[in-house]
Image (spheres, grey):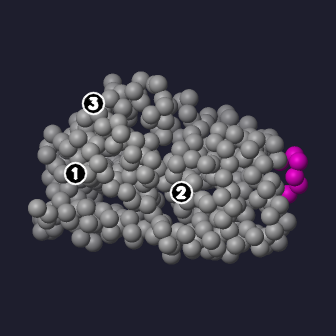
Amino acid sequence: MGTGKNKVAIIENHELGIYSIRHDLVKALADIYEVTVLTEVDDSFKEGDLENIVQFKDIGKSVLNPFTAMKYNSRLQKALKQVKPDVCLTFTIRPAIYGNMVTGRLKIPTISTITGTGPLFESKSLSYTFARWLYNWVLKKTRFVFFPNQDDLNAFVERGYIREEQARLVPGSGVNYEQFAPQPSSRGNDGKFVFLYVSRLIKDKGVMEFVEAASILKNQIPGVEFHIVGPLWTGNKKSLTVTGKELNGWIEKKWIIYHDKQKDVRPFMADADCVVMPSYREGMNNVLLEAASMARPLITTNVTGCRDIVEDGVNGLLCKVRDGKDLAKKMQEMMSLPAARRVEMGKKGREKMIREFDKKIVIQKYLYAINDILHGD
């Protein structure tokens, strides 16, 4: 039986993205619309709170490889024909491409969010060459295209992938500063200094540089620890991912302490003296947003989507990209700061998150765009 509400479909790579980064947005949409999520489902979040208010349809994993994408497209088209949404939202590169191919055919108004470009413009691989070719035409009829930073927006307009009037700027996924509020550390006065890296173990997130810095400093400085939270990842090209053998080697050498995937990263951030994200490029890095909101000082690379969050010397430090040695120097600099200075950095970071990156700002922009499609001229 229908609810009488307008229908919104969300195309996402994996349910992890829905339950973590887009959780608050999905809840806000479900208050107003009948929401269906089309994604890869592996039951990791079977007891999640969205199950009762949102319908999930498992359409598997979207892939960039042109030879294996056809089955995914077929499943996606079948699901959208069943759901018959009034508006469709897509997130990340592959759903943006394949989602718009299908929604264009089905004439479903679409809002696409380019959450980050990664190696899209630099890579010469077949997959990314194909992606660039597809972008030349798949977004032409998309109603709105949201970007987390001005650099990515400009790049898509300059390359002719979209028209300027389609583009909208949004502060990434934003951060729920009430959920990610400062918490007391469980460590007490243990005399250690803890650096924390939170991400999938893929190379363009800077995990190799984090481990290189750890290998440099571990034997030089007593009491320093390097913690990693995040899963091994098979969703990217093998050349970009960390292997189980590599990970085990780091653990055996005692360079890092590994915590695997965690549903709640807040206790780990609370116990960290500094959160580190040496990414090669971001849309707007969510780990940095969350850590800053929890008033942790940060170290990140001087690149798009990271320097937007960290002001060098104010709420953290900026290091060179793809440079583990420079990262190690910045880590030493962070450790040498008086504790009161790091506390002040954390305080400044939280103030910036509340002022500029409140998730309510992000949600409102999506609600306005959907309303424009449904009720605009």
Where residue 316 sits: x, y (%)? 67, 61
Tell me the number on the disc at residue 122.
none
Say whether residue 15 is magenta. Answer: no
Residue at the spot x=48%, y=68% of the render? 356
Q: Nearer the viewer, mark 3 or mark 1?
A: 1
Residue behind mark 1: 143
- The answer to whether the residues at label 3 and label 1 have Cβ atoms under 8 Å apart is no
Tell me the number on the disc at residue 70.
3
Of mark 2 and mark 1, the one earlier in the sequence is 1
Helix, strand or loop at label 3? It is helix
The answer to which quarter of the image holds residue 325 is top right
Of mark 3 and mark 1, the one earlier in the sequence is 3
Query: Label 2 to label 1, Cα distance in Å?
Result: 26 Å
Residue at the spot x=30%, y=37% of the render? 160
Q: Quadrant of the N terminus?
A: bottom left
At label 2, counting other C-alpha atoms closer than 10 Å, the crowd grade (few under 14, some 14-19, many 20 or more) is: some
Q: Which residues are magenta?
A: 218-223
At label 3, the amino acid type is Met
- The answer to whether the residues at label 2 and label 3 have Cβ atoms under 8 Å apart is no
Main SS of residues in magenta: loop
Helix, strand or loop at label 2? It is loop
Residue at the spot x=61%, y=60% of the render? 311
Where residue 117 sits: x, y (%)? 44, 42
Q: Nearer the viewer, mark 2 or mark 3?
A: 2
Residue at the spot x=48%, y=29% of the render? 123
At label 3, counting other C-alpha atoms closer than 10 Å, the crowd grade (few under 14, some 14-19, many 20 or more) is: some
Residue behind mark 2: 308
Q: Quadrant of the C terminus?
A: bottom left
Query: Label 3 to label 1, Cα distance in Å?
Result: 24 Å
Q: Is 214 located above or below residue 297 in the figure?
A: above
Q: Work out whether residue 294 can be spotted.
A: no
